[in-house]
Image: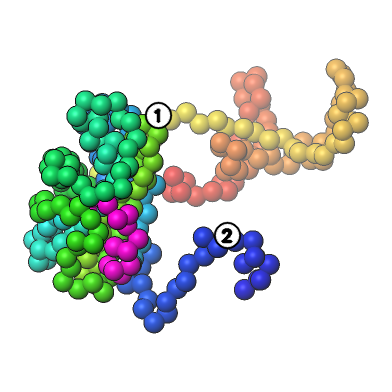
């Protein structure tokens, strides 16, 4: 790799890839997950705006694969870490972690309690009242989680509990890989990131289900009769479309001075004979060759050759 290129890339943009532990989610699968992240951004924006009556934006979703212990270690100490139980028809229940950073939580709490949303980020443990307010928020966000996955698969999320500190997280296997979906949030110009961590086994089962459905859809036999009716309907709607037809006598090149010297009455000699074919274009695409002539005292053209197959329509 070019060393000069590497020297121009900021260190923060460089990521170390562990070839001993390759990523389990392929790039093509991210397109399916993007359906959920895009819907979550839209629905969460509407949810928070409705709760606070303030302008809010949830945007720039990012999907990463990371070990659980690395994920927890990067969270602020006093984040509101909330547990959800996710269940689907063909997968066992699993733990999903929803991280709400303290700066976003406190501005939401302040607005809900009648304040003006003043930024506040205390460095202390959360009180019981604050934990109760967080439970209230999570029950609202629970609906957003359910609806955001509808485009991929029906998943039932149920709120479980709130952990007021990352140190209190209980996990059965801290080395398990997680798929973390991170979103930028802006509430009254207060910026923060919320993140949701899913077990990678759960995500893989969803992707397998989606790929199976896609394969079944692609293997559905085509009904020839219905397809013929559909094509006839399309052609019928196109028959009334207006097209521009142009007859091109000839084309020549002139320099700028010759063009500037042109005046009324000047004759421009063409490179074609009067008996040569001219070109007929439809919407600037050559379709026919034709002869120039007269018809009922009007100039006309007679088609002599078809250049394009009409079936291309």
Q: Residues within 10 Å of mark 2 (few under 14, many from 20)?
A: few
Q: Earlier in the sequence, mark 1 or mark 2?
A: 2
In this orientation, which residue lies closer to the viewer: 255 or 96?
Answer: 96
Residue on which disc 1 sits: 240
Picture layout, residue 181 above or below residue 67: above
Q: Residue farthest to the top?
A: 264
Q: Position of residue 273 (x, y in %)?
A: 79, 39
- Asked if residue 202 lies left or right of residue 305, the reply is left
The segment highlighted magenta reads 67-82
The answer to whether one can see residue 156 in this image is: no
Asked if residue 68 is among those painted magenta in the image, a careful observer would answer: yes
Q: Does residue 60 appear to the left or right of 68 in the view shown? A: right
Q: CA distance from mark 1 to mark 2?
A: 57 Å
Q: Residue at x 18, y 68 (%)?
A: 171
- Residue at position x 25%, y 36% in the image: 108
Figure quadrant of residue 271: top right
In the drawing, does residue 185 fall left or right of residue 4?
left
In depth, the one of 220 and 20 nearer the eye is: 20
Residue labelled with disc 2: 10
Q: Secondary structure at mark 2?
A: loop
Frontmost residue, 144 versus 12: 12
Residue found at x 8% / y 61%: 89
Q: Secondary structure at mark 1?
A: loop
Q: Which mark is residue 116?
A: none
């Amino acid at each position: 790799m070019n060393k000069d290129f590497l020297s121009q890339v900021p260190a923060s943009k460089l990521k170390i890839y562990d070839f001993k532990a390759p990523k389990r989610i392929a790039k093509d699968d991210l397109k399916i997950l993007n359906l959920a992240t895009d819907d979550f951004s839209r629905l969460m924006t509407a949810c928070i705006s409705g709760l606070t009556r303030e302008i809010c934006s949830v945007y720039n979703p990012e999907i990463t694969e990371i070990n659980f212990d690395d994920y927890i270690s990067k969270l602020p100490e006093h984040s509101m870490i909330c547990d959800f139980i996710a269940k689907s028809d063909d997968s066992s229940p699993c733990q999903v972690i929803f991280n709400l950073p303290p700066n976003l939580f406190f501005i939401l709490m302040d607005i809900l309690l009648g304040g003006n949303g003043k930024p506040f980020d205390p460095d202390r443990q959360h009180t019981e009242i604050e934990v109760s307010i967080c439970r209230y928020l999570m029950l609202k966000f629970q609906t957003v989680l359910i609806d955001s996955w509808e485009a991929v698969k029906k998943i039932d999320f149920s709120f479980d509990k709130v952990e007021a500190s990352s140190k209190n997280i209980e996990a059965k296997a801290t080395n398990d890989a997680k798929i973390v979906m991170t979103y930028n949030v802006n509430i009254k110009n207060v910026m923060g990131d919320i993140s949701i961590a899913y077990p990678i086994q759960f995500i893989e089962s969803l992707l397998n289900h989606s790929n199976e459905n896609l394969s079944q859809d692609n293997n559905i036999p085509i009904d020839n009769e219905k397809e013929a009716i559909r094509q006839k309907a399309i052609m019928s709607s196109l028959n009334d479309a207006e097209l521009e037809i142009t007859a091109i006598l000839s084309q020549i090149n002139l320099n700028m001075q010759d063009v500037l010297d042109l005046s009324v009455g000047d004759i421009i000699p063409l490179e074609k004979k009067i008996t040569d074919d001219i070109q007929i274009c439809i919407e600037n695409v050559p379709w026919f060759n034709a002869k120039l002539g007269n018809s009922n005292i009007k100039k006309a053209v007679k088609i002599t050759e078809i250049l394009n197959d009409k079936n291309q329509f």
